[in-house]
Amino acid sequence: MILSNLHTHTVYCDGKNTPEEMVLTAIRKGFSSLGFSGHAYTPHDDSYCMTPDNTLKYIDEINLLKEKYKDKIEIYLGCECDLYSLIDRSKYDYTIGSVHYVKTPDGNLHPIDHTEDIMIDVVNKYFNSDFYSYIKSYYEAASQISKLKPDIVGHFDLVVKFNEGNKYFDQTSKKYLYLAFDAMDAVIPHCDLFEVNTGAISRGYKSTPYPDALLLKRLLEKGADITLTSDCHNADFLDCHFQEAQQLLKEIGFKSAYILQGGKFVEQSL
């Protein structure tokens, strides 16, 4: 089983654990590598991300941990960039590009994944209770994620976080899949490494990873690559559902996933 994770959050942003606690957990579990991906600063919303001061402290601490534990595990300094983040990419070993906000018709940004109540309120207030208009706005933003030049595309269908069991819209419908596929197809030529993210499983929102199975099949058809991540905010869930996710990927037809090893993305059999 692949034991590596490149999507890890700590107390420097919205995570529960210190970086060193995450490292020690990864070592105990037998991980070959661990990448940290603190949320880059978003000026319009600092409720979840690293502040400019915390960003500097985060960079210093991860670099210290790299040296301290170099004989036990490979550690990488990454950052999760939102479409609306401010970031100096030169400071990081890799970046994850994600969309966490939907732009409403009045030009304001609202969080996609904060709470279910906020999602419902935004859909009702700004999109005339039409979930597909809301989804369209999200995927219009997601289609532009390659502007960030990320190494990894993060939780591509985050918009389905509160839709377990097709509670609000049908993820198998042509109407939904057209929007999702169109955005995905726009990104793949510029960044073809997508994460398979188990984070919403650990937090009880979903029973399967991002992206869902139909989108994963699309990635396979388009020749895109994948990396398995837990979007970890709590060390207890560092390898959450990795075994089940790898089985799902093999059933879909994927043969391998990528990890960081020796400073490079390396293909590893599932």
Image (cartoon, rainbow, N blue to C red):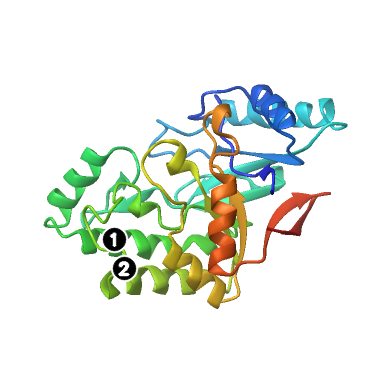
From where the camera sits, is residue 188 visible? no
Q: Is residue 11 above or below residue 199?
A: above
Percent position of residue 198, x then y: 50, 46
Q: Amino acid at mark 1?
A: Ile
Image mark count? 2
Of badges 2 and 1, nearer the viewer stands 2
Category of crowding for the residue at label 2, using alpha-carbon neighbours closer than 10 angstroms: few (below 14), some (14–19), many (at least 20): few
Residue at figure coordinates x 55%, y 33% from the top left: 237
User: What SS does tag 1 mark?
Assistant: helix
Distance between the alpha carbons at the discs numbered 2 and 1: 14 Å
Category of crowding for the residue at label 1, using alpha-carbon neighbours closer than 10 angstroms: few (below 14), some (14–19), many (at least 20): many
Q: Which residue is mark 1?
A: 135
Percent position of residue 144, x then y: 46, 64
Quadrant of image for the C terminus: bottom right
Residue 103, picture quadrant: bottom left
Q: Is residue 137 left or right of residue 96?
A: left
Percent position of residue 105, x then y: 21, 57
Q: Is residue 237 above or below residue 108?
A: above
Q: Is residue 234 left or right of residue 35?
A: left
Q: 2 or 177: which is nearer to us?
A: 2
Q: Amino acid at mark 2?
A: Thr
State the residue lying farthest toward the right: 71
Percent position of residue 129, x then y: 13, 55
**Tag 2–tag 1 contact (CB < 8 Å):** no
Q: 238 or 87: which is nearer to us?
A: 238
Residue at figure coordinates x 22%, y 52% from the top left: 167
Q: Is residue 58 left or right of residue 49?
A: right
User: What SS does tag 2 mark?
Assistant: loop
Q: Which residue is mark 2?
A: 172
Give the mark nearer the N terminus: 2 vs 1: 1
Q: Is residue 62 above or below residue 145?
A: above
Q: Is residue 68 above or below residue 217?
A: above
